[in-house]
Amino acid sequence: MADRLLEITGVVSQRDMQDQKLDDMDLERERGITIKSHAIQMPYTQDGINYTFNLIDTPGHVDFSYEVSRSIAACEGALLLVDATQGIQAQTISNLYLALEHDLEIIPIINKIDMDGAMIEEVADQIIDLIGVDREDILEASGKTGLGLEEILQAVVARVPAPKGDPEAPFQALIFDSIFNPYRGVIAYFRIMNGKISKGDKVRFYATGRDYDADEVGILHMDLVPKKGISAGDVGYVITGVKQAKEIKVGDTLTLAANPCEKPIDGFEDVKPMVFAGIYPIDSDDFEDLRESLEKLQLNDASLVYEPETSLALGFGFRCGFLGLLHLEIIQERLDREFDMAVITTVPQVSYYAYTKRQETLLINNPSDLPDPTMLERIEEPYIKAQIISLPEYIGGIMGLCIERRGVLINQVYLSKTRVEMTFEMPMAEIVFDFYDKLKSLSRGYASFDYHQIGFRQGELVKLDILLNGEKVDALSALIHKAKAQSFGRRLCKKLRELINRQQFMIAIQAAIGAKIIARETLSAFRKDVTAKCYGGDISRKRKLLEKQKKGKKRMRQVGRVEVPQQAFLAVLKLND
C-alpha cells in the first residue's frame, strides 16, 4: 500500500520502484515485515490545490508496538488497513485503541480486495461493529494493483485535519526518530508543532539542555532533501554534528536557544521491556565495540534497553531488555549484519519481584540476582492479558495450549460467525519462548495474538541451576514454575549432552534446585588407546599404562574447563521442538 502511494504521488518513478520500497533493511525484505517506522513526505494535487502529506509506515507485529506509539504521537490521522482475507486481527484492535486515545481521525480501509478469498462484506461488518462507522465511510483498495488509491488520498484531504501549529510562536518540535551516519553524526527526525527553523540556527535539546548549530535542515523524501528553512506542520530532519548517540533522545523536544519554548511537548510513554537476555561478545576484547554498537542501535531503535553486567561463564557483557522474542532475534541479527559483532545471547527471562524476610523488595532481571532461598518470602511474576482472535474450529487446541501454559480463560466473544475472540490471563514467562509459533501452527496461521501487562502476582517459582562438573553455569540459570522444573531440567540436560563436545575426561551435566539434583546426564570421555604401542610382553605393562591414564583423567577432570558452545544457549528456546 505504501509503495502504491509513493507511485501515485510521484515520489518514486515506476522505473526506480521495488517491493517494500520504504523498508530499507535487508531483514525487513527477507522476512516480509516492517521493523522500523519510515517517514516520508508526499506532494498531492486535487482541484488545483497543492497538498503535502507526511506519511509514516509503521510495523504491525506486537513486538514493535512502540514504533507505532511514537508515530501516532506525531500524526493527525491514521489509515486502518484490514486484510480482506484475514479480517480484523488482535494487533489491529490494539493499535486502533492507541490511535483513538490520541484522538486521531481513523480512515478504515479493506485491503487486498483483488484476492480470491476476499470476504469484503464480512470484514466491513467487523469494522462497523468495532468502531461504529457507516458502511460508506469504509474504503476498498488493493495495495497490489493500486485499485482505490485515488479515493484514499481524497479521503485524507477531506477527513484528516491539517496541523494546527502557529508558525510565529517559539520553535517547538517533537523528535520521533533518529539515525546514525558515520560521516555526519546523529540525524534527528522531528515533527514541528510550532514556529520555524532555518539552517544555521542554534538549537537546544530539552532533555540534555545542550545547544548545537543546525548545520543542515530539510524534509524527508526517499533521500534527505536540504531546505533553507521549514515551519509548523512540517516533518523534517536536522543535522547538528552530534557524534554521541546518548545526547539525542527519541521523545525529546527540540527548540531554539535564542527563543526557547516554555515547556516540552508531552512525548510518548517510556518503553517497558518485557523480556531480558544477556548479550556477550564472543571475544572479551570486543566489549567496547559491543557498547558502541548497542548505543548506535538504541538511537535507531529506542525500545532497546541495556546495562552492563558480568557473568562467571561469559565475562563482561550487557543485560538487554526487549519487547519480545522477535525483537531479540532482530537485534541479534542486526548486530551481526550492521556492526559485524558476533555475540552470545543467554536464556531470555522476564523480570520478577522478590520479597525478602527483611521486608526488602528486589527487582530480579537475572536469576543470579535472586537472594538465598532461606531469605526469600515470596516471588511475584508478571501477568499479561492476552487477546487471541481465531476461527471457531481452533478453539479447543488454543484453549489446551493456553491452559497448559497456566492461562485462565476470562472471556470468549464471537465477533462474527467465523471469528471468535478469547481473552486469557497468563504468566508472561509462559509466552516468552515458543508460544506464538505454537499458536500459529495450531491454528494454521489463522490466529492473531496481542497482549499487554496487567501487573505482578505471586507464583511458586524456583531457581533452576545447570552444573557442569559441579560448577554452575550462571548464563543457563532460569526461574521456572515448580511443577515444570523437573521435566525442563531433564530436557535441558539431554540437549546439553548432545551439544557439548566430548573431552578427554568424563563430564557430569546436572540440573539442580538449591542443593537438590533433579536431573543428570553423563558425557563419556574420549578413550585414547595408550596400549597401542604394546605389541607383546606381560599384561602388567598394559595395566600399568591404563592406571597411569586413569590418574591423568582424574586430575584433568579436577582442573579441566568445559567450554559451553553458543548453540547451547539457543537450545533452551527450542526444547519443545
Image (cartoon, rainbow, N blue to C red):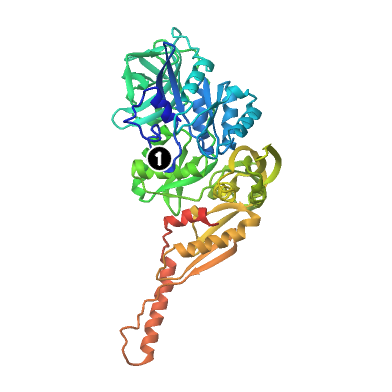
Position of 262 relative to 142 (above/below): above
Position of 364 relative to 202 (above/below): below
Residue 464: quarter of image: bottom right
Tell me if I can see residue 314 in this picture.
yes
**Which amino acid, by three-letter code, is at mark 1?**
Arg
Instruction: Report which residue position mark 1 lands on.
Output: 29
Q: For mark 1, does the 10 Å Cα neighbourhood hold few (<14), some (14 to 19), or many (20 or more) residues?
A: some
How many numbered marks are there? Answer: 1
Q: Residue at x 52, y 39 (%)?
A: 116
Q: Is residue 52 left or right of residue 394?
A: left
Secondary element type, mark 1: helix
Residue 428: quarter of image: top right
Position of 410 relative to 259 (above/below): below
Q: Nearer the viewer, residue 434 or 544?
A: 434
Q: Is residue 459 left or right of residue 202?
A: right
Q: Residue at x 45, y 53 (%)?
A: 312
Q: Where residue 114 appears, x then y in whole percent?
A: 50, 35
Q: Nearer the viewer, residue 22 or 185?
A: 22
Tell me if I can see residue 74 in this picture.
no
Q: Where residue 410 appears, x then y in whole percent?
A: 71, 41
